[in-house]
Image (cartoon, rainbow, N blue to C red):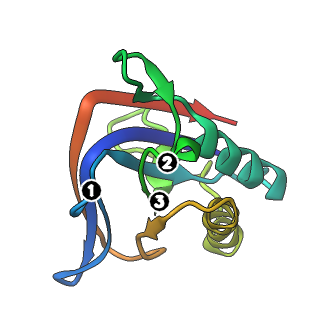
Amino acid sequence: MKAVIQRAAHASVTVDDEIIGQIGAGQAGPGLCVLVGVTHDDAEAQAIKLADKLWKMRIFEDDEGKMNRSVADGSGELLIISQFTLYGDARKGNRPGFTDAARPEIASPLIDLVVSELQSKGATVATGRFGADMKVDLRNDGPVTIVLEL
């Protein structure tokens, strides 16, 4: 699994002109906008590990301005968006290939598992719609962006 984790003051995802998921609306602090890609050999173990990492990752500032707080500390919501293009390979030619991305029947349940694991920990989680043409609006806070591969 691969994730691009962005600390966001606000983020939303829209499908067909309807906002289907958002974080940061009327919220005191930032949240995380997370793009998640799944590859062929990913399984439930990677999804559970990713959820745990997202829950505990200390990338929110404490009272001294140090990145020392996590979502687990009450530091925000999460917007999880499936993103098969994270496994795009453009090393040869100019058109990326996506053979490293898992098929939807493998990827979709694993993305759902990341979301349900986070929710079971008490996180507020919004999502995109798997396989849809989505428009993502993001105000990156910091900016803080972490690329994680499990």
Q: Residue at x 23, y 63 (%)?
A: 25
Query: Amino acid type of disc 1?
Result: Ala
Does 82 appear above or below 85?
Answer: below
In the displayed structure image, the side of residue 82 where residue 117 appears, left or right: right
* Rendered location of residue 76, percent (x, y): 41, 50
Q: Residue at x 68, y 59 (%)?
A: 121
* Rendered location of residue 18, percent (x, y): 21, 83
Task: Say which of 98 and 19 sits in front.
Answer: 19
Query: Amino acid type of disc 3?
Result: Ile
Does 13 appear above or below 138?
Answer: below
Going from N to C along the chain, the mark reached first, 2 or 1, is: 1
What residue did someone put label 3 on? 80
Q: Quadrant of residue 119?
A: bottom right
Query: Amino acid type of disc 2?
Result: Gly
Q: Is residue 57 visible?
A: yes
Task: Say which of 75 and 109 sits in front.
Answer: 75
- From mark 2 to mark 3, how far is it between C-alphas? 17 Å
Q: Which mark is residue 29?
A: none
Image quarter in which the N terminus is found: top right
- From mark 2 to mark 1, how far is it between C-alphas? 18 Å
**Label 2 residue SS:** loop
Q: Is residue 98 visible?
A: no
What residue did someone put label 2 on? 74
Going from N to C along the chain, the mark reached first, 1 or 3, is: 1
* Rendered location of residue 46, percent (x, y): 76, 48
Q: Quadrant of residue 17?
A: bottom left
What residue did someone put label 1 on? 11
